[in-house]
């Protein structure tokens, strides 16, 4: 990887000083997926990824229209929601997009202020500030639309002591497979349409006070056949990072175009989940049936020691084990990172997960983009969508 790309990482603190403080974000509260069958999806995420049962809302709790299962692993919370009748708007989302992310919920100190500050800067309202109460206290939530039909929900929970949110009950289950070591959401990547990336970069800058601290163009992210452009947006404290991708012209159809075709519009492409031991996590995930993209060729792994030496870093993991599992390595001035990508988690070639372990690096695997693209293109060729 060129030092030119990663040199952007220098002085991140100074860059973030420019981020506006009108929208302080404490972290990712939860990610809600609209799915065709929440009960079965919950079983999959528990069995395959080691998520634990946390909370439930459905017919038994008085919810007549929707059902939701909440799963947790360390700081990660996934909400899986399905409609209970044909009249629900969720049906339209599932029919159009398949299973996919609807809500990226952000934990805030003041949801009313977050809503007011973002809507007055041009955000389209999804939900005006709403108070929800039960015997465990109250929460305030409010929502705005971002790209496509995706929503940012602001969650204020300082006056709530319940398991998840009002209206949910604790989900007791005798079946809780062991976690695989996923810790928190490192970043979430959105795919937008042709020539829309800069529009949404400006939206995050103007509406949410984010900064663009890394940019990649089609000269940096390309293979013989396809290309994309990407910009990474972050809030002031760096806890929330949203890379945004758009397609770029190539000889054949890129993974971004394929996503847009099958998701039928912009949306969340993947969720990157951090771990402290990627070798153990990936070993466990493979043993549970999770499929990852194909392993890069020998020359990729042969070049890793030299790439690390360029930045004066030494690999602490066994390179043969990394190669055997298909885990990729990238480096910048501050360290290196280990990452791997699952195949799509549903039949449509849309959303997938990334597993990432940071060993000091602040980047997003720019040196792996070519190898990653080639792996995806091999899958696209099998699907007949390249």
Image: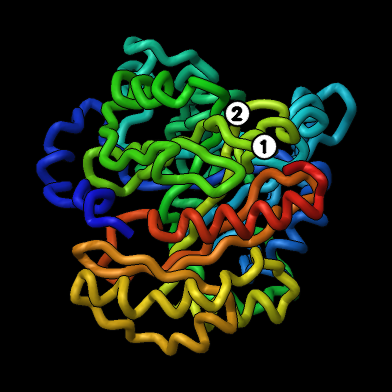
Would you say residue 199 is visible in this rendering? yes
Instruction: Classify the position of the C terminus by image quarter.
Output: top right
Mark 1 to mark 2 CA distance (whole Å): 16 Å
- Where is residue 262 drawn, in percent x and y? 75, 35
Relative to residue 31, is residue 173 depicted above or below? below
- Where is residue 214 drawn, in percent x and y? 30, 42
The residue that appears at 20% across and 63% down in the rendered structure is 333
Is residue 24 shown left or right of residue 285? Answer: left
Which one is nearer the viewer's eye here, 375 or 51?
Answer: 375
The residue that appears at 28% across and 49% down in the rendered structure is 5
Relative to residue 156, is residue 221 depicted above or below? below
Instruction: Classify the position of the N terminus by image quarter.
Output: bottom left
Q: Which mark is residue 266?
A: 2
* Crowd rating for badge 2 (residues with CA inside 10 Å; few <14, some 14–19, many 20+): many
Is residue 233 shown left or right of residue 264? Answer: left
Q: Check if mark 1's residue and mark 2's residue have beta carbons within 8 Å.
A: no
Give the foreground label among 1 and 2. Answer: 1
Q: In which image quadrant can residue 68 be found?
A: top right
Which one is nearer the viewer's eye here, 218 or 79?
Answer: 218
* Crowd rating for badge 1 (residues with CA inside 10 Å; few <14, some 14–19, many 20+): some
- Where is residue 320 drawn, in percent x and y? 50, 88
Residue at the disc numbered 1: 253
Q: What element carries label 1?
A: loop
Would you say residue 75 is visible in this rendering? no
The residue that appears at 45% across and 36% down in the rendered structure is 229
Which one is nearer the viewer's eye here, 14 or 162?
Answer: 14
Tell me which numbered mark, 1 or 2, is placed earlier along the sequence.
1
């Amino acid at each position: 990887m060129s030092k030119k790309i990663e040199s952007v990482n220098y002085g991140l603190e100074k860059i973030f000083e420019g981020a506006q403080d009108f929208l302080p974000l404490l972290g990712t509260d939860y990610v809600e997926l609209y799915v065709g069958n929440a009960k079965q999806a919950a079983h999959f995420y528990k069995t395959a990824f080691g998520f634990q049962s946390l909370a439930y809302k459905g017919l038994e709790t008085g919810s007549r229209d929707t059902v939701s299962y909440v799963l947790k692993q360390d700081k990660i919370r996934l909400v899986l929601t399905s409609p209970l009748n044909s009249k629900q708007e969720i049906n339209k989302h599932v029919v159009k997009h398949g299973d996919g992310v609807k809500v990226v919920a952000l934990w805030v100190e003041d949801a009313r202020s977050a809503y007011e500050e973002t809507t007055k800067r041009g955000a389209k309202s999804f939900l005006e500030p709403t108070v929800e109460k039960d015997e465990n206290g109250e929460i305030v939530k409010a929502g705005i639309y971002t790209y496509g039909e995706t929503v940012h929900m602001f969650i204020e929970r300082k006056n709530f002591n319940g398991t998840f949110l009002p209206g949910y009950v604790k989900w007791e289950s005798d079946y809780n497979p062991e976690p695989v070591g996923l810790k928190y959401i490192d970043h979430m990547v959105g795919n937008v349409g042709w020539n829309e990336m800069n529009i949404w970069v400006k939206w995050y800058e103007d509406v949410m006070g984010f900064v663009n601290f890394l940019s990649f163009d089609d000269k940096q992210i390309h293979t013989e056949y396809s290309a994309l452009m990407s910009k990474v947006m972050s809030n002031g404290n760096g806890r929330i990072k949203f890379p945004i991708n758009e397609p770029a012209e190539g000889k054949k159809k890129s993974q971004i175009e394929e996503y847009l075709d099958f998701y039928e519009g912009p949306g969340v492409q993947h969720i990157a989940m951090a771990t402290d031991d990627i070798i153990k996590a990936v070993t466990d995930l493979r043993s549970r049936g999770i499929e990852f993209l194909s392993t890069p060729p020998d020359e990729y792994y042969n070049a890793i020691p030299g790439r690390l030496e360029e930045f004066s870093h030494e690999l602490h993991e066994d390179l043969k084990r990394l190669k055997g599992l298909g885990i990729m390595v990238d480096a910048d001035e501050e360290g290196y990172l280990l990452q791997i990508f699952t195949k799509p988690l549903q039949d449509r070639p849309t959303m997938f997960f990334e597993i990432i372990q940071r060993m000091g690096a602040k980047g997003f695997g720019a040196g792996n983009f070519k190898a990653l693209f080639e792996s995806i293109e091999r899958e696209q060729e099998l699907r007949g969508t390249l």
